[in-house]
Structure formats: C-alpha cells, structure tokens
Image (spheres, rainbow, N blue to C red):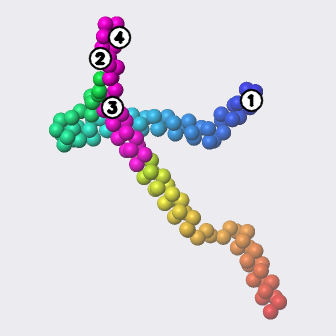
Amino acid sequence: MFQEFKKFAMRGNVMDMAVGVVIGGAFGKIVSSFVTDIIMPPISVLTGGVDFSSLAVTLKKATVGHEAIILHYGAFINTIVDFVIIAFAIFIVIRQINRFKKKEEEKPKEPSEDVLLLREIRDLLKSKNS
C-alpha cells in the first residue's frame, strides 16, 4: 500500500498540483494585500470615507455573559473584490497560455529525417520507372 501511495504521490500531475496550490496561496495573500491596501482606500475616498472592512450590522446586542452577534458584511465585500481580481488574473494567464499553444499548433512542422529519407527513396523510384 505504501508503494502504491508513493507511486501516486510522485506522479507529475500530483506534484504540479501541489506546486500550484502553494503558489496560489501566496498569490492569494498578495491579492488580498493589494485589495486591502491599494484598491479599497481610493474606493473609500470615493464613497465618502467608508471603510468596507469595518462595515457591520449588529443582529443582537451584547448582554451579560453573551457577546454581540454581528454580521460583518464589509469583510465579505473585500473578499468578493479579492475573488474578482484573482479570477481576472487567472483568466489573463490562461488566455495567454492558450494563445501560445495556438501559435505553436499553427507553426508548420518540419518533416523528420525518416520522412525526408522516404521522400528521397520515393523520388528515386519514380525517376527509375520513368
């Protein structure tokens, strides 16, 4: 069972996926910082100083022995903006990858040595029969 697991874990797709998850996690942190520190302050200025991350609605006030129940919808707005930016960035990357693949497919491939040799043989046979 250990050998089978080792074979599974060392396949190329699993390793590629692991690298993608790690890089994706780091990329997510970068985008979160970008949204929180770069995007949201100008939006806050445009909306009259509203800080989205602090927007909340108190559903139930705090009482003795119980904390308040608060709906933090501002944090949710920040998360949605994070998602949209990440999705757009991934879309751009995938689009570029597809363009490169398409250009490679469009390039005419040069025939291999075997094909060239077979063509020479064919041409020689044709010239002998003529």
- Three-letter code, disc 1: Gln
Q: Which residue is mark 1?
A: 3
> Dot 4, how many residues are within 10 Å of its Cα: few (below 14), some (14-19), or many (20+)?
few
Measured Cα–Cα span from mark 4 to mark 2: 9 Å
In primary-sequence order, the first of circles 2 and 1 is 1
Q: Which residues are magenta?
A: 59-88
Instruction: Please tell me the numbered disc located at residue 61.
Output: 2
Do callouts 1 and 4 mark residues in contact (Cβ within 8 Å)? no
> In what element is the residue under mark 3?
helix
Along the polypeptide, which appears first: circle 3 or circle 1? Answer: 1
Which residue in the rendered view is the most extreme toward the bottom? 130
Element carrying mark 4: loop
Location of mark 3 (residue): 73
- Marks 2 and 1 sit apart, C-alpha to C-alpha, by 57 Å
Looking at numbered disc 4 in the image, what kind of residue is underneath it? His
Residue 94 percent coordinates (x, y): 48, 52
Question: Is label 2 or label 3 in front?
Answer: 2
Asked if the stretch drawn in magenta spans residue 74, the answer is: yes
Q: Residue 15 falls in which quadrant of the image?
A: top right
Q: Are marks 3 and 4 in contact (CB under 8 Å)?
A: no
